[in-house]
Amino acid sequence: MKPPSPGLWVGQTDEGEIGLLYETIDEILYRIDYNLGFNGLNKEDIEKVRKMRKIAEHKLKMPPMYEIK
């Protein structure tokens, strides 16, 4: 299976751009969502995922509705 890529240049991958494997990101998000500990995980990776999640938080909300006149 081909790794996900923005396709802007040869060899570019999403994981390479983020600097973390999806497997690591998924594990951290799972532990955050279920309030589990972070034993065995890199502290910098945890903070990076938390920051990315906070930055993207607005994408979970519906945009405001505007009345067209």
Image (tube, grey):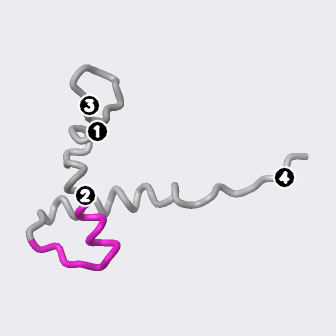
Residue type highlighted by circle 1 = Asp
User: Residue 10: horizontal and vertical position, in percent?
Assistant: 24, 20
The amino acid type found where label 2 is placed reads Lys
Q: Residue at x 20, y 45 (%)?
A: 19
Mark 2–mark 4 distance (CA, rounded to whole Å): 39 Å
Name the residue located 14 percent from the left edge and 66 percent from the top edge: 43
From the image, tell me which residue sits under label 4.
67
Where disc 2 sits, the SS reads helix
Q: Give the main secondary structure of the magenta stretch.
A: helix
Residue where numbered disc 1 is placed:
14
Three-letter code, disc 4: Glu
Q: How many marks?
A: 4
- The numbered mark, 3 or 1, whose residue comes first in the sequence reads 3
Tag 2 residue: 48
Q: Earlier in the sequence, mark 2 or mark 4?
A: 2
Instruction: Judge whether 41 appears above or below 69 on screen.
Output: below
Question: How far apart are the alpha carbons under marks 1 and 2?
Answer: 15 Å
Q: Name the N-terminal-most of marks 3 and 4.
A: 3
The residue nearer to you, when weighing 25 against 67, is 25
Residue 7 at x, y percent in the picture: 34, 25
Local SS, label 4: loop
Q: Tell me where residue 12 appears, x and y as whole percent.
A: 25, 28
Q: State how far apart marks 3 and 4 are (Cα).
A: 44 Å
